[in-house]
Amino acid sequence: MAQGGIIGRLRPTIDFDILDTYDLRVMRIVDMSDWKHLVTESSYIEVTTPGRKVPVLNYFKKGKINVLNNNNLELSTADNVGTLGSMPDGIYTIKVYICEGETFFKEVCYLRTVNTMLELDKRLISMNLCSCDADKTTLEKYLEAELLLKSAHANTRDGNFTQAICEYEKAKKILCELESCGK
């Protein structure tokens, strides 16, 4: 067997996914890595939060769901889980690595929109779509905001961060317009 084949089978694969949650206080990162011979080495997660340039470093638990919050991302401090504040929406850069992070790592940009989606949910509920009084203009604005958020996520996954933020901000503006209409 060729040497490249053996080395390839011994090479760790760092992989993780961000679990969808509507909990304003946390972000959950699930480890899906194949750590191979590095299973006993320390692993790390670096997170750059929206509006920051410098990442925050934490240990990354292999084979587990890692929970990020305002405390471990150094956004605020809370005495207990019940008093954790809402994590901000925006683009998070998340890097999981082992050793010095130069050879074995995975880095992704993730657009968090939990706060905005929950506000959008409130507008959807208030429209009472079963009612004959459902306002067509409000519904169209809601659908536009929802589509903009979906496009913002797609652009983030594709690396088009400027377009993603533009669409996200436009969706938030529409949401503000919808909130003022309902009052």
Image (spheres, rainbow, N blue to C red):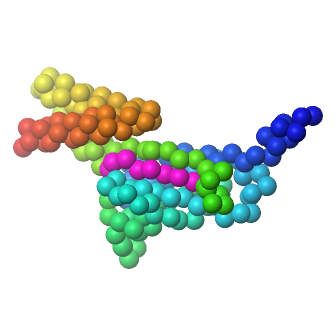
Numbered marks: total: 0
In screen coordinates, is 46 left or right of 142? right
The answer to which of 145 and 123 lies nearer the viewer is 145
Q: Is residue 158 magenta?
A: no
Residue 76 sits in quarter: bottom left
Q: Position of residue 159 (x, y in %)?
A: 43, 36
* Image quarter in which the N terminus is found: top right
Farthest residue, direction right: 1
**What residue appears at the point 57 percent right and 54 percent down from the top-left corner?**
96
In screen coordinates, is 173 left or right of 163? left
In screen coordinates, is 157 left or right of 183? right
Q: Is residue 89 magenta?
A: yes
**What residue appears at the point 50 percent right and 58 percent down from the top-left corner?**
46
Magenta span: helix, strand or loop, mainly? Answer: strand
What residue range appears in magenta? Answer: 87-96
**What residue appears at the point 17 percent right and 36 percent down from the top-left corner?**
174
